[in-house]
Image (tube, helix red, strand yellow):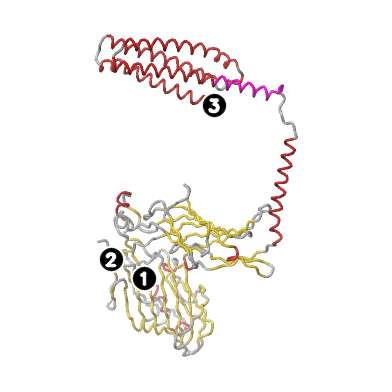
Amino acid sequence: MATPPPPLLVAALLLIILASASASVERADLVVTRADRRVDLTSHIVRVLTSLKVENIGPEAVSQVLLPFPNAQAKNLAAIRAFGTEGKVKGPSTLLPIEVVQPSGVPPELTFFSASLSKALEKGKTLHLDVLTVFTHSLQPFPEEITQAESQLVVYQDSAHYLSPYPVKVQTLSIRLPGGRVESYTKYPSTKLADSELKYGPFEDVPPFSYSPMGVHFENNNPFAVAKEVIREIEISHWGNVQITEHYNIAHGGAKLKGEFSRIDYQSRPYIRGVSSFRHLIARLPPRAHSIYYRDDIGNISTSHLWSDSKKTQLELEPRFPLFGGWQTTFTIGYGLPLQDFVFNSVGKRSLNITFGSPMEEILIEKLIVKVKYSHLDIAGRPVVVLEKPDFIPEHNLYFQVYYRFNNISLLREPMMLITGFFLIFMACIVYMRTDMSISKNSPSYLAKVQWDEVQSIIQKIQAIFEQSLAVHDKLEASLHDLSRSGDVQSCKTARKAADTQFKELAKELKPLLTSLQSSLQSYQIWPKVESLVAKERELQEKLMARHSTVVDSFEKKLRGQDVENRIATQQQKVAALRQEVESLLEYISEM
C-alpha cells in the first residue's frame, strides 16, 4: 500500500514558534474557552465550521478577533464568513465584516483575517463566534492516476489543533468522511474513528499558535466537478422574459484515468468499472423556469431529466460520455424566466434581482463570467455589464442587483419599426411589379445566357448517349453470365453483333453533338472533361469487346472455368477501372 505524501504544512512548525513569540498584547487579552471544529470532506469542496467561545480577560475592550491561516492553506480559501453574538448563552448571531490584516510582529508565512465586532467586547464578557471557511483544491488524489475499475483515494491534511493566536482551554476536531474505506489517518491518544466520522480531542490548555499535523487518506468517489470557465449570460426582454444562457467547460478534477477506457465494461457494470467517474450533474433552477434546453457543439443532448414543482425546477444533466479524472466536456444550457419575478420597478428606474452564479450543485468554477444585458432593437448598441469571479463555489451564489433606466414608451418603437418595415417591403414589391426589368436580347449578358443554355442542352444529350452506351455494356456482361450458365455460344455471339450495331448508332448521334459543343464559347471549362469521357468510353468498349471475344473463344475450345478466369483476369480489372472512371466523369459533368 502506498504511503500518503507528508503534510504540506510541516514548514508551519517553525512559523508557529516565531508567531507565538511575537504575540501582541491585544491578542493576549482574549482567551478561547472552547473551540469546536467540524470539517466536512464529503465533497471535493472542503467546508470547515469553527465554533469559538471567546472571553475577554484583559483590562480593555476588544473590537476585533484575529483568524490566522498558514499561507499554504489560505491560498485555497474560497470563502470565509463569521457570525457573532455576545453573552454567556448563545443567541441569535449577526454577520460580522471580515478583512485581511497584517498585525505587527507576525511572520509573513501567516495570513490573518480580522472579524470586526459590531460592539466592542468589554472586560469579562463572552463572545460566541462561528466561522465558516470553504477551501478548494484541498483534497489531493493519491495515487494521482488510477485505472477504470479502481476507487479514488484522496488525502486531506490539516492541524489537529486549532491554529489560534489566543490560548485555547478546550478544543475538539470532528471530520466527516463520505463513507467507504479509510486507508490511514494520523493517530493521537484522543483519536477515534467511528462509522464515517473521525474525532480528535478534547485537547486542553493548548497554547497560542499550537500546530499538530494530521492527515487522513480515504476513499472519495463523489463528483470532482471543476469548471475551467463558465460564461453566464442574462438577457432581459421587456416583452416578458429573462433569458439565461450558460456555457460550461467542465473537467473531472480527481485522479487521472490510467490505461484505456472500456465502454463494454462500463456499460455492463458502471458502478464497478467506473466508480470514480461521474455521469450526471444536478442544476437547481428557479421554480417557473421554462423553455429549457441542453446542447453541445454536436446538437441537442437528449440524456437529461427535468422535475419541477412550486418551489424549484431540478434539471439532471448527463453528458454524452462519463467523465473520468482529467477528462473534460463542453456544453450549454439555457432557460427562460418570467420577467415579473426578477425585474422590478423602483423610483425612476428598474432593477434586476437574480442569483449571481451557476445553479449546478457542488461545482467549483475557476473562472466565472456573468454578462447582464437587455435587448431592445439593438440599433444603437446593447449595454452590457460584465462581472468576473475566480474560484466560484456554491456559497457565492447569492442574489445581486443591477439598476438601469428604461422608458415604457420605448416598447412601442419595436412594433412601429416592424410596421414601417413591412410597409416599405410592400411598396418595393409594387414598384418592382410595375418596372420592366427584362434584359435586352442584344445585350452581351443575354447572349451569353442563351449560349450557356445551349451548352447545357447539349451536355444533357451527351449524358443520355453515354448512359445508353453503359446500358449496352451491361447487356454484354449479362450475355457472358448467360454463357457461363448455359454454354450457348451462338446466343452470346448474337448479343455481340447487336451491341456492335448499337455502338455505331450511338457514335453517329454523338458526333454532331461533340462538334457543336467544341465550337461553343461557353464550353471552355467543360470541354476537356467531355473529351476525356469520350476517350475513356471508347477504350472501355475496346477492352470489353476483347474480353468478350476471349470468353467466347475459350468456350468454343471447351477450356475449364478456371482457365477462362485466368485468361480474362487482367482484362476484367482494366474493364472495372475504366468503368469507374467513366461513371466518375459523368457525375462530375452532371454537377458542373
Q: Position of residue 202 (x, y in %)?
A: 33, 81
The reply to whether dot 1 and dot 2 touch (C-beta < 8 Å) is no
The residue indicated by pointer 1 is 158
Q: Which mark is residue 592?
A: 3
Residue 582 appears in view = yes
Q: Quadrant of residue 250?
A: bottom left
Name which of mark 3 and mark 2 comes first in the sequence.
Answer: 2
What segment carries the magenta color?
A: 441-459
Q: Residue 454 magenta-drawn?
A: yes
442 vs 588, left or right, is: right
Please tell me whether mark 3 or mark 1 is closer to you in this view: 3
Cα separation, mark 3 vs mark 1, equals 74 Å
Cα separation, mark 1 vs mark 2, equals 20 Å
Q: Position of residue 557 (x, y in %)?
A: 26, 9
Q: Which mark is residue 181?
A: 2
Is the N terminus in the top left, top right, bottom left or bottom right quadrant? bottom left
Q: Nearer the viewer, residue 50 or 297?
A: 297
SS assignment at label 1: strand
Q: Residue at x 38, y 56 (%)?
A: 279
Residue 449 versus residue 224 in the image, above or below: above
Q: Amino acid at mark 2?
A: Arg
Q: Nearer the viewer, residue 36 or 166?
A: 36
Magenta stretch mostly in which secondary structure? helix
The reply to whether dot 3 and dot 2 touch (C-beta < 8 Å) is no
184 vs 9, left or right, is: left
